[in-house]
Structure formats: structure tokens, C-alpha cells
Image (cartoon, rainbow, N blue to C red):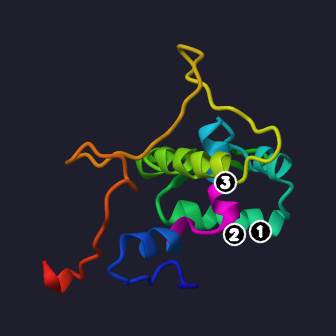
Amino acid sequence: MDDINSCDDPCPIARSLAVAGDAWSILILRDAHAGLTRFDQFRKSLGIAPTMLTRRLAALAEQGLLEKRRYSERPPRDEYVLTAAGMDFLPVLFIIGAWGRQHRGDSKLVRFLDAETGTEIKAIAIDEVTGAKIGTRPIRIVNVDED
């Protein structure tokens, strides 16, 4: 799964991890959702090495989660803006955060608030078909050939 362009595993989790499965990529997406768009903003927020950040931003753009846009010609400067696929990643971030709050919340943690109401967002995953909270019912994984 090292080559993000060639994941042909039928599992959607494996395919997703091939695109955004490392901590840096997920944290870049978190920061992009917080409004960061420029290389220096990401570098300052994350404390990431410039070469690593360059690779991660390029991969996220190549995979369609971020769009690279030129905002200055002299000197040439680009920004990275969330695409529709990148925006759709927000619930994933919130579910990861909810898990972290429950199982890794030993110290003070940031809170995520609804910008309009000011209330804390407490994410849960719900099955759209049954309305059941995911994790409360047994699951079965079925190979594509067994449908």
C-alpha cells in the first residue's frame, strides 16, 4: 500500500488509507478545514519538515482532496484549497477526534464548536439505512464476489 496510486484492494478502508492514511496527511486535512491554505501556515501549525510537507501536499492534491492554486505570480506562490472530496473528509476527522477524546483524552483537549450556535460538536457515526449507531450492532464483511 506504499504506492498511493495503485491500491486496488476491494476494501474501501484500505483504499482510503492509501490516500490519507498517515498522520501528516490527516493533520494537513484537519488544518485545511480550519482555514489554513498556505505552505508556511501548515508548516508552522504542524512543525513538519518542508520536504515532508511538500510531498504530503502534492499527494493530497494528486488524489483530489486538495487543489493547488496559484495566488501570486511574483514570487510564484501556491495555496492548497479543499476540494469536494477534501470537504467530505470532515466527518472522518470528527469521528477520529471522538475516538481520541474517549480513548486518548488524558489531558486537556481542544473542543470543536458549531460556529453558529457555539455548542460543542459531539460526533457519532450512524448507519443511514437503520439509524443505528455504528458499533452497536454486529457487522459482516462481504467480498465483492459474494453479493
Instruction: Report crowding for label 1: few under 14, some 14 to 19, many 20 or more residues within 10 A (C-alpha).
Output: few
- 17 left or right, relative to 74: left
**Principal secondary structure, stretch drawn in magenta:** helix
Q: Which residue is mark 1?
A: 52
- 60 left or right, relative to 52: left
Residue at 85%, 47% in the rendered image: 44
Name the foreground residue: 1 vs 106.
106
Of the residues under marks 1 and 3, which one precedes in the sequence?
Answer: 1
Q: Is residue 57 above or below residue 39?
A: below
How far is the residue under mark 3 from the one under mark 2? Answer: 30 Å
* Pointers 2 and 1 in contact (C-beta within 8 Å): yes
Q: Which residue is mark 2?
A: 55
Q: Position of residue 2 (x, y in %)?
A: 58, 85
Question: What is the quadrant of residue 119 in the picture?
Answer: top right
Magenta stretch containing residue 67, yes or no? Answer: no
Total numbered circles: 3
Q: Position of residue 111 (x, y in %)?
A: 68, 32
- The amino acid at mark 2 is Arg
Question: What is the quadrant of residue 15 in the picture?
Answer: bottom left
Q: Which residue is mark 3?
A: 103
How far is the residue under mark 2 from the one under mark 1? Answer: 5 Å
